[in-house]
Structures are given as C-alpha cells and as structure tokens.
Amino acid sequence: MKPVNYVKFTFLSRSINESFARGAIAAFAAQLDPTVEQLADIKTAVSEAVTNCIVHAYPADVGQIQITAAVYENERLVITITDKGVGIADVEAARQPMFTTGGAERAGLGFAVMESFMDNVKVRSKLGKGTRVTLIKQLHMREHTSRPLFCAA
Amino acid sequence: MADVKIERKDSVMCAYVSGEIDHHSAAEIRETIDRALIAKDINLLTMDFGGVTFMDSSGVGLILGRYKLLSALGGRLVIQGTPPSVNRMLKLAGITKIIEFKGETADETC
Ligand SMILES: Nc1ncnc2c1ncn2[C@@H]1O[C@H](COP(=O)(O)OP(=O)(O)OP(=O)(O)O)[C@@H](O)[C@H]1O
Ligand SMILES: [Mg+2]
C-alpha cells in the first residue's frame, strides 16, 4: 500500500536532537488527529529509538540517524529510525526488559516502552552495519468518518 | 528544556525537576543533583516531578541512578508529585516497588 503522506529527514547523533526528532514526528502525526495520549505515546517511542542510536549505535563518535514517517489511508502511522552504527548482536535478547549494555544510568527499558506504547515494533540489525527500528501505530479507526481524511492534494 | 531547582536544609535535600526529561536533559539534571548531594552530607533526597511534561526511560535511569547513589551514601530517596504520564513510565519500569513513592500527596520533607 502506498502512503498518503510521507516525510524523511536525517540528523547527526547529538543528544540535543532528541527533542527535535520527537517534536518533528509529533507535528507530522498531528494530521491524523491523535488523542493527547496517543501523541505522548508516539513521542516517547520515537525518543527511545533515537536515544538508542545516540547512546548505543554510535558510542564513540557522531553518526547519521535517518527518520521516515508515513501515514496510510487506514490512519496507520509507520515510523522508521535507522542508524549505520555498531548493530545489535542478539536482537531478541536486547528487546528483553532490563537488558542493557549501557551501565548504571540506563534502565534497559527502551524496547519495552516502544512495545507498550506502539501497536507493533520491528527491529532489523546487522553487526557493524546498523539498525532499523520500525514503529507502527494504528490511530483511532473511526467507523464512519464523516470528514474526508485528506481533502487538499 | 528541563530545569532542576535544589533546596537544602541540613541533611535533607529536595530537587524540583521540570520540563522534558530525556537522555540529553537527564545528564544535566544528574550533574546538578549529584554535585549538590556530594557537597553536603545528605541523607534524604526528595525528587519532585510536579513540573515534568515529558519523560522517557532516561528518567527511570535518572531515578535508579540516584537511588543507588543515595544507598551507597547511606541515605534515602523519595519521589513525589509525579504526573500521570510519569506514573505510567514508573509502573512499566516496576520502579514503585523499589523506591519510596509519595504519590501526589503534600510532602512533609520539602
Ligand atoms: N540502535 C542500536 N544500536 C546498537 N545497539 C542497540 C541499539 N538499540 C538498542 N541497542 C542495544 O539494545 C539494548 C537494549 O535497549 P533498550 O533501549 O531496551 O535499553 P537501554 O537503552 O539499554 O536502556 P534505556 O532505554 O532504559 O535507557 C541496549 O542496551 C543496546 O545494547
Ligand atoms: Mg534505550
């Protein structure tokens, strides 16, 4: 299925960009008219994925992070967060709550938060090549939408 | 983005955190709190989250880190004033079982 709308941007893995990234995606998601809680869920999940790129993917240097966000006709929001960093050796282990390689100041909760706040989370990773996290949220399916979702082209 | 105000009286310290807590701002909050903690002999730290508008798992790490530091120094950590969004994160983390949690009631320490 082709998206109805789409954005894509790239930024450096500097921690100051965490708030920019979640804010930009929240602004994009606003066209789906999400509830306050849904918007908070999306912001938090994006913040987790972006922070992981900054903290784990590029531990010693600064690299590029690419985000795409797409909305589909059925009010589905699909976000990808991609890095070209160190990769994850065992994705299944990494997704377990409390699993962290980040030391005392990290809770090992990022993936658990993404899974709990989004409808579907996919992780593809290759050691030395990088990681792509896909976050999917199904916004309220109004049974009888009276207003057309997208009027102007 | 985020701000932390410190109040100290004898061995009791309160940290009022406000704004958005993420990995970036947590580093600054942590440094401010730890500097104040270590400068004085603190045996009770209360962290107030009343002004927090956003928090991801970095906030949980911030709390756990202060909890460990306080324990190592022979002190206590209490958290209070957490808005619903923060409560959700703390619940998911299972952190309310480990840490003294005051909910939203008025405090007697700060
Ligand atoms: N983009 C990434 N590149 C490389 N490793 C990653 C990436 N994302 C996650 N990881 C690995 O997966 C582990 C778990 O990630 P998760 O976000 O669940 O916890 P955390 O980042 O360690 O802690 P928290 O998110 O609570 O601060 C990380 O410790 C890291 O080892
Ligand atoms: Mg993380």
Image (cartoon, rainbow, N blue to C red):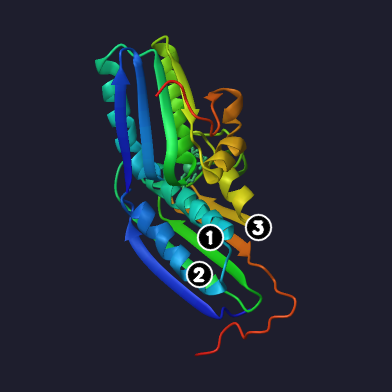
Q: Residues within 10 Å of mark 1 (few under 14, many from 20)?
A: many
Q: Label 3 is found on which chain of the structure?
A: A
The residue beneath circle 3 is A119
Sequence-first disc among 1 and 2 = 2
* Residue under the point 42% across and 24% down: B46
Sequence-first disc among 3 and 1 = 1
* Residue A118 visible in the shown view: yes
Q: Nearer the viewer, residue A68 or B62?
A: B62
The residue beneath circle 2 is A30
Q: Nearer the viewer, residue A6 or B6?
A: B6
For label 3, being within 8 Å of ligand 1 is answered: no
Q: Are marks 1 and 2 on the same chain?
A: yes
Residue A39 tag number: 1
The reply to whether dot 3 and dot 2 touch (C-beta < 8 Å) is: no
Residue B73 tag number: none
Q: Nearer the viewer, residue B93 or B76?
A: B76
Three-letter amino acid code at the position of disc 2: Ala
List x then y, in percent, for residue A127.
48, 47
* Residue under the point 54% across and 27% down: B102
Q: Residues within 10 Å of mark 3 (few under 14, many from 20)?
A: few
* Residue under the point 66% across and 76% down: A74
Question: How far is mark 1 from mark 2, CA to CA?
Answer: 8 Å
Sequence-first disc among 3 and 2 = 2
Name which quarter of the figure residue B8 lies in. top left
List x then y, in percent, for residue A96.
61, 38
List x then y, in percent, for residue A40.
52, 55
The reply to whether dot 1 and dot 2 touch (C-beta < 8 Å) is: yes
